Each structure stands twice: as structure tokens, then as C-alpha cells.
Amino acid sequence: MSKIVFAAAAALAATVAATASALAWERGPVQSDQNLRFARAYVERARDMLSHDQADYGGHRVAAMTDINEARADLTTALRYDHNKGDAVLPAVTLPGPVDAADRNWVRGQHRSNENIEFTRRYVEKAIDTLSHDREDYGGYRVKAIGELEQARQQLTLALQSR
């Protein structure tokens, strides 16, 4: 009798595990898309922040912006890869606030630019971390974006060292 109960319990456990795995796969791409949207929002914020800096930092700021723009394009392509209409929406949490959106023409002074480079590097690192924990490939665009963001992080580090 105990063998029958044990076999039934094992079969039930296998069924539950298979069902949970199927449900996780079903939810996986949606969560993965959300990760891409958050990473793209971090990239948007980093791009916006760097655009207001005064100093060039020996060309490193511009090089970082180029890498960030390339990552931004790759993340947009990655989001469109599965043709989900909701992928065009960025999470409101990390979008620029109303002050940033209202005045796009202001420029930071040198001291604030130095602080901003460090702060922007943290946004780039958050995007890299978010993308690194994603399990979907999106036609290789996710990995390509990670590489470009790592280059941007290196350029921002060099910018900080050049001041």
C-alpha cells in the first residue's frame, strides 16, 4: 500500500513540477520584456543626463553617448523582436521628471558635470545588471546592447579619470 501511495505522490509531484515549469515559461517572456523596458528606461535616462554636461572629458563623454545610443537602438530592436505592442511603453518610474522634460536646453557647470558622470555610470550599470539577468536572447540584440553598455561604462570611467 505504501508503495502505491509513494508512486501516486511522485506522479503528483512530477505533474505539479511540469505544470509550474509550463506556467513559468508562459510568464517568462512577459517578465523578460519588462526587464528590457526597464533597461531601456535606464539607458534613456543616462542619455538625457549626459546630454546636459558641459565638459567633453577628452572625448570620453561623447564616446559614451555614442555607445549608449547604439545600446538604445539595439534595445528598441530587441523589444520589437517578438512583435508585442506593449513594448513601446517605457516604465514611468525611471522616465525624466517634469523639470527635465520642460527644459531640455540647460547645461551643467563643471562641478555638477563631474558628479553627473558618476551618477550616469550607475544608470548604465543598472541597465547592464538588468539585462544580464534576463534569460531571453531577442535575436542577439540583448547581448549586443550589454556589450555597448559595457563600452559606455568604460568610457565614463575614463572620463572620471581624465578630470
Image (cartoon, rainbow, N blue to C red):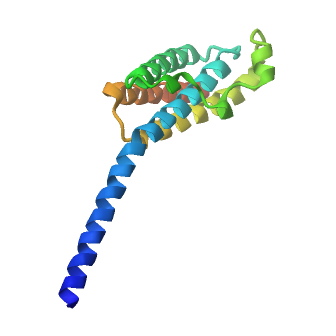
Residue 162 seen from this side? no
In the image, residue 28 lies at what x, y percent? Answer: 40, 43
In this view, 28 is above or below 147? below
Residue 102 seen from this side? yes
Look at 71% across and 14% down and name the residue there.
Answer: 54
Q: Count the labels in the image.
A: 0
Look at 71% across and 30% down and name the residue there.
Answer: 115
Could you tell whether 158 is left or right of 142 in the image?
right
Q: Which quarter of the rendered picture does the C terminus lie within?
A: top right
Q: Which of 20 and 154 is in front in this view?
A: 20
Q: Which of 32 and 122 is in front in this view?
A: 32
In the image, residue 68 lies at what x, y percent? Answer: 51, 20
Look at 49% across and 37% down and name the residue there.
Answer: 35
Q: Which quarter of the rendered picture does the N terminus lie within?
A: bottom left
Could you tell whether 157 is left or right of 82 in the image?
right
Could you tell whether 106 is left or right of 1 in the image?
right
**Extreme-bottom residue of the structure:** 1
**Residue 148 position by quadrant:** top left
**Extreme-top residue of the structure:** 105
In the image, residue 141 lies at what x, y percent? Answer: 37, 25
In the image, residue 128 lies at what x, y percent? Answer: 48, 35
Q: Nearer the viewer, residue 90 or 147?
A: 90
**Residue 100 position by quadrant:** top right
Look at 33% across and 54% down and name the residue there.
Answer: 21
